[in-house]
């Protein structure tokens, strides 16, 4: 009898234990299987190039909300090399709740070995309200890759939050501590601080003093009246070199220069002006309206576009600070270059560059596409200056201007390289419009030479 009761009790205990196991364990094996199924769905969606299905698959992984689910999004979608897939995946992540998955994305935004992932995640996290997301974007200001630091600046600028000001000041100090006062990152930080405060200062110490002295006003999102800023500042502004008036605020720059046959053209003198070269005295002038001035017979040689470019290039090269690295690229139907990489602005390299400029010989068509592609391949380039007097053109292999703009957008999506463009006032509106749009898309500046 006792043995039977003992067995019955043992049996009940075993049943209770089994019931507890059934209650507690189903979640453990089910979650990996579910994540795997969602991961497979994402892979199928990517393979089919179906934007909607990519979004749906990522949304399902976001519901799971685990770090492993987010790692699947990174490895499959954000590293796909397909901008459509990347964008759809980021949309699918919008409803991700705070938790281990979001924490994982914050970590990968600063520590993932691929800069493309860090770039995409910084843009995504900047749109979130969680404190850990803001911290991750701030940390991006110190990224070893300038391109990612530029993305962090752009992301913070999009938020326009005054709480970013002291962090931007510290990031500027970080650039100065590395002797990078004229780096593109430093300049973009100054531009953002100017937008947030209304002040126009240079050194981090000046900005720090401005913030500490006006924290109450600036912290409310209000701008200061420049006329009432009495801070003189303790820093000394480093004047950057310029090319046709365009300040060069990057120490790693590639000049892409049009040497096609149209660069032989001579531009009319601005109305009311006179030739500056003695050899041209007494010679022509045609004003901007195309009318000849009385007593003038032909356009002066000094107004040839290529000669003007050579003269300005030589002046600029001689003035480049030693901290600058640069490269010269020319293009007509083909592309020529001074070097395959950036060179330091040493006396020897400057002499080499001046000799290269002297050998410019205008001929052929305008292969702007090939020249820009080459410029993007130069290691370390942070700014491109494109000078041209016409639309991209090749007779045997026509260039579609709009497709070229889209192609450059694709090349530049993780580099964030500003493309400053320089055109000529006397050329067609289409040419100027193309150059201006190219600069606008890349946060560059268009300069028109009279």
Image (cartoon, rainbow, N blue to C red):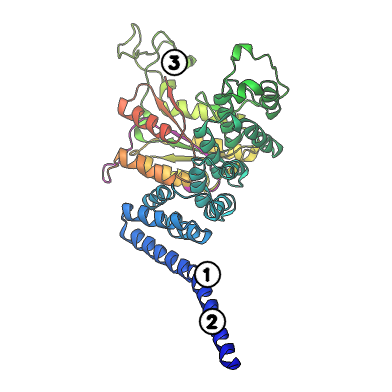
Dot 1 falls on a residue whose secondary structure is helix
Q: Nearer the viewer, residue 387 or 407?
A: 407
Dot 2 falls on a residue whose secondary structure is helix
Q: Which mark is residue 12?
A: 2
Q: Answer whether residue 378 is visible to the viewer in this image.
A: no
Q: Which residue is mark 3?
A: 280
Local crowd at mark 3 within 10 Å, few (<14), some, or many (≥20)? some
Dot 3 falls on a residue whose secondary structure is helix
Mark 3 or 2: the one toward you: 2
User: Which mark sits nearer the N-terminus, 3 or 2?
Assistant: 2
Question: Was residue 366 drawn as part of the magenta stretch in this picture?
Answer: no
User: Which mark sits nearer the N-terminus, 1 or 2?
Assistant: 2
Question: Was residue 387 drawn as part of the magenta stretch in this picture?
Answer: yes
Q: CA distance from mark 3 to mark 1?
A: 94 Å
Q: CA distance from mark 1 to mark 2?
A: 18 Å
Q: CA distance from mark 3 to mark 2?
A: 112 Å
Residue 193 at x, y percent in the picture: 59, 27
- Residue 121 drawn above or below residue 356: below
Q: Which residue is mark 1?
A: 24
**Label 3 close to label 2 by CB (< 8 Å):** no
- Residue 24 drawn above or below residue 435: below
**Label 3 close to label 1 by CB (< 8 Å):** no
Residue located at (48% from left, 46% from top) = 414
Residue 318 at x, y percent in the picture: 60, 30
User: Which mark sits nearer the N-terminus, 3 or 1?
Assistant: 1
Residue 348 at x, y percent in the picture: 63, 40
Query: Of all residues shown, which one is farthest toward the front?
Result: 1
Q: Nearer the viewer, residue 81 or 182?
A: 81
Query: Quadrant location of the C terminus?
Result: top left
Give the magenta part as a residue range: 377-397
Local crowd at mark 1 within 10 Å, few (<14), some, or many (≥20)? few
């Amino acid at each position: 009898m006792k043995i039977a009761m003992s067995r019955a009790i043992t049996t009940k205990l075993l049943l209770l234990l089994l019931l507890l196991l059934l209650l507690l364990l189903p979640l453990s094996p089910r979650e990996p299987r579910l994540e795997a199924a969602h991961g497979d769905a994402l892979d199928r969606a990517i393979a089919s190039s179906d934007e909607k299905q990519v979004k749906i698959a990522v949304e399902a992984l976001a519901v799971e909300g685990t770090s492993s689910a987010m790692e699947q999004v990174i490895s499959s979608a954000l590293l796909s090399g397909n901008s459509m897939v990347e964008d759809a995946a980021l949309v699918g992540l919008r409803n991700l709740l705070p938790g281990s998955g979001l924490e994982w994305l914050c970590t990968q935004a600063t520590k993932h070995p691929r800069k493309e992932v860090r770039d995409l995640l910084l843009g995504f996290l900047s749109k979130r309200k969680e404190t850990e997301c803001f911290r991750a974007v701030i940390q991006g200001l110190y990224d070893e890759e300038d391109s990612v630091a530029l993305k962090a600046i752009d992301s913070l600028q999009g938020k326009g939050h005054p709480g970013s000001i002291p962090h931007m000041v510290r990031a500027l100090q970080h650039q100065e501590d590395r002797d990078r006062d004229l780096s593109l990152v430093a300049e973009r930080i100054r531009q953002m601080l100017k937008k947030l405060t209304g002040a126009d200062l240079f050194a981090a110490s000046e900005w720090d003093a401005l913030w500490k002295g006006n924290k109450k006003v600036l912290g409310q999102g209000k701008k200061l009246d420049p006329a009432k800023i009495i801070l003189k500042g303790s820093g000394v502004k480093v004047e950057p070199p310029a090319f046709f008036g365009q300040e060069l605020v990057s120490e790693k720059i590639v000049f892409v220069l049009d040497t096609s046959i149209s660069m032989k053209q001579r531009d009319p003198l601005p109305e009311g002006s006179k030739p500056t070269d003695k050899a041209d005295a007494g010679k022509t002038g045609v004003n901007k309206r195309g009318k000849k001035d009385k007593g003038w017979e032909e356009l002066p040689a000094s107004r040839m576009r290529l000669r003007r470019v050579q003269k300005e290039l030589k002046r600029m090269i001689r003035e480049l600070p030693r901290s600058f690295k640069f490269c010269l690229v020319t293009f007509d139907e083909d592309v020529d270059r001074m070097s395959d990489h950036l060179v330091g602005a040493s006396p020897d390299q400057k002499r080499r560059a001046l000799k290269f400029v002297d050998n410019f010989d205008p001929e052929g068509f305008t292969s702007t596409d090939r020249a820009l592609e080459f410029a993007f391949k130069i290691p370390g380039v942070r700014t491109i200056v494109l000078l041209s007097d016409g639309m991209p053109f090749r007779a045997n292999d026509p260039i579609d201007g709009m497709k070229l703009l889209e192609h450059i957008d694709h090349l530049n999506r993780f580099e964030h390289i500003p493309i400053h463009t320089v055109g000529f006032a006397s050329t067609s509106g289409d040419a100027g419009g193309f150059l201006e749009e190219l600069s606008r898309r890349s946060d560059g500046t268009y300069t028109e030479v009279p």
